[in-house]
């Protein structure tokens, strides 16, 4: 099975390489589509922040067009997004028309009263287009369903031995039986 994995791939918080490696270990052929370095990083200053927040402008249009081209060229079975803020329902429907399954993992709370203004509006409108959603918070399951999701599963935080291994602490002044991360 061929998967296109669409995500930030930000160097400051590397969540995506864990997902990528897990998919590969499962025997999937994975093609990464990095958003941060290729697109978001070029959005500078106040204008760039507005384009990123409200998902418009030439960089956002290029992002969507490039993903559509990649999907048409590679013909994946599955397209998985992590935090797909910049994708509108029309783009997703074009992707879906290729026959690919569309899923996403959303680790923010798009329905929070404290959410950043404008940031989640495209995503909320596109919820019904996805075949499945995986959410960080259990409380979001009912909210996603109310907004048209077909299938929602709770996907809590995880531990990866390779990434979250801080080595052996030799200093015996610290005595502990368990550590919560």
Image: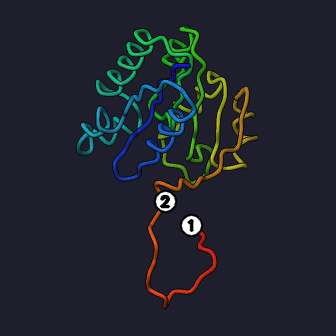
Vertical side of 170 occupied by 141: above or below:
above
Seen at 58% across and 43% down, the residue is: 110
The residue lying at 58 percent from left, 38 percent from top is 105
Mark 1 crowdedness (10 Å alpha carbons): few <14, some 14-19, many ≥20: few
> In the shown orientation, is residue 26 left or right of residue 68?
right
63 or 8, nearer to the observer: 8
Taking the spot 46% from the left edge, 55% from the top edge, the residue there is 163
Spot occupied by residue 113 in the image (x, y as percentages of width and height): 61, 52
Q: Position of residue 5 (x, y in %)?
A: 47, 29
For the residues labelled 2 and 1, say whether their Cβ atoms are less than 8 Å apart: yes
Is disc 2 placed on a helix, strand or loop? loop
Q: Which residue is mark 1?
A: 181
Say how many tags the image has: 2
Of 58 and 7, the residue lying toward us: 7
Where does the image place residue 141, in percent across and percent down from the top left? 73, 41
Left or right: 26 in relation to 4: right
Q: Residues within 10 Å of mark 2 (few under 14, many from 20)?
A: few
Q: Quadrant of the C terminus?
A: bottom right
Q: Please determine whether, in this image, residue 157 is positioned above or below residue 69.
A: below
Q: Which residue is mark 2?
A: 164
The Cα atoms of the two marked residues, 2 and 1, are separated by 9 Å
Dividing the picture into quadrants, the one containing residue 144 is top right
Q: Which quadrant, please, contains the N terminus?
A: top right
Q: Residue 160: percent from the left, percent from the top?
A: 54, 53
Residue 2 circle label: none
Q: Is 76 situated left or right of 14 in this image?
A: right
Taking depth in this image into account, of 97 and 45 the one nearest to the observer is 97
């Amino acid at each position: 099975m061929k998967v296109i994995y669409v995500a930030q791939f930000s160097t400051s918080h590397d969540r995506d390489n864990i997902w990528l490696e897990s998919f590969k270990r499962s025997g999937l052929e994975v093609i990464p589509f990095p958003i941060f370095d290729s697109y978001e990083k070029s959005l500078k200053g106040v204008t760039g922040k507005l384009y990123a927040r409200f998902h418009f402008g030439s960089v956002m249009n290029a992002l969507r067009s490039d993903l559509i081209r990649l999907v048409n060229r590679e013909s994946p079975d599955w397209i998985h997004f992590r935090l797909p803020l910049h994708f509108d329902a029309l783009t997703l429907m074009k992707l879906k028309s290729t026959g690919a399954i569309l899923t996403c993992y959303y680790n923010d709370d798009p329905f929070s009263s404290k959410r950043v203004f404008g940031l989640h509006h495209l995503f909320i409108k596109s919820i019904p287009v996805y075949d499945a959603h995986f959410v960080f918070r259990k409380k979001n399951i009912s909210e996603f369903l109310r907004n048209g999701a077909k299938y929602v599963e709770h996907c809590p935080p995880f531990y990866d031995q390779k990434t979250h291994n801080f080595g052996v602490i030799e200093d015996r002044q610290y005595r502990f039986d368990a550590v919560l991360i």
